[in-house]
Image (cartoon, rainbow, N blue to C red):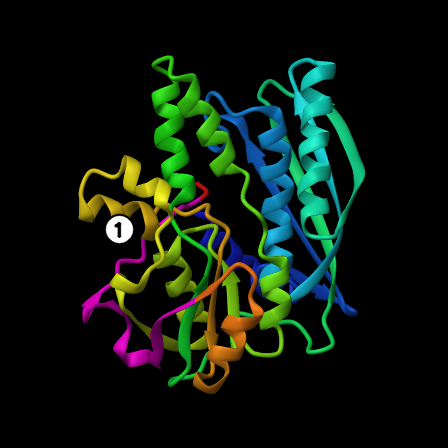
Amino acid sequence: MNERDALRALAADLPHAGDDAAVVDGTVITTDMLHERTDFPPGTTRYTAGWRAVGASLSDVAAMGAKATAAVAVYADAAFDDEKLDRFVEGAVDVCEAVDAEYVGGDLDTHDEFTTASTAIGDASDAGVVTRAGARPGDALCVTGEWGRSAAALRLFERGDGGDDEAVERANGLFRFTPRVADGLALADRATAMMDSSDGLARSLHQLAEASEVGFELDPDRLPVHPAVDAVAEGPADRFELAAYFGEDFELVCAVPEDAVEPAREACPGGLTRMGRVVDAADGVTADGDPLPDRGYTHG
């Protein structure tokens, strides 16, 4: 059973689960777990790990259109290295400060593999939260930011295995994304459905389509690709692969009524790109008229 199947199986017994975050009495809460072997390539600094781990949870708060307020994290390793631990906490503090939230502590444990679990909380905006379930045919399909940065980082980390220290430094910089909390707040009273892109654009569209019982028509040429992708991609097909399927970019994917697209674009500090439209469920999820595979990052 993979992660998506497990979530479906749990949904009946956990009414607050199933979206990017749970909402209880106006409080938004979410948690994530990351492991060294699967989430932190060789060369990832502890500062980057702290930033990225806590940032992943803050991104889920952003996807609900909520204001992030605080975060905690668990830090587990085979042995406690004071410098590594300090750098991890520094990264966690800095990513929180980047979105006007506060890092307030966590827990320490021993483990044979560096592992971290983070939890972020936030407050629903006056407009309420944005779920995955409200997209309507005729809405515009929009995304924030630029895509493929994490895929580009992975390739640079791989170059670092060959001794390229500059590539490792660039890779760490790309891994330290800014959670789109400000953009989520700007979209809270405009988007009809929204989620973050941790599993990749293609998979996110299929998840939104399932939750909203709609389809999506995507124009791949409009996808805003991060410049770092062009430096590592092996041709146009690989470029789209890295931007659309790799995942872990933590951008926002949303449906917005046509008359709200321009105001939403002006309000989003991370940028907002219209790249398609919501269609009937029977039309499925397509790119340039062809079915877009439900492919992306999967846990297990």
Tell me where the magenta segment starts and ends, as one range: 273-298
Q: Specify the farthest residue to the front.
A: 266
Q: Which residue is mark 1?
A: 240
Whether residue 295 sits left or right of residue 204 in the image: it is: left
Q: Is residue 281 magenta?
A: yes
Q: Amino acid at mark 1?
A: Phe
Q: Is residue 63 above or below residue 246?
A: below
Q: Residue at x 71, y 22 (%)?
A: 85
Q: Percent from the top left, x then y, of residue 179?
A: 59, 51
Q: Residue at x 26, y 78 (%)?
A: 283
Q: Percent from the top left, x then y, of residue 290?
A: 18, 67
Q: Is residue 236 above or below residue 183?
A: above
Q: Residue at x 59, y 31 (%)?
A: 49
* Quarter occupied by the C terminus: top left
Whether residue 188 sits left or right of residue 2 in the image: it is: right
Badge count: 1
Q: Percent from the top left, x then y, of residue 106?
A: 78, 36
Q: Is residue 1 visible?
A: no
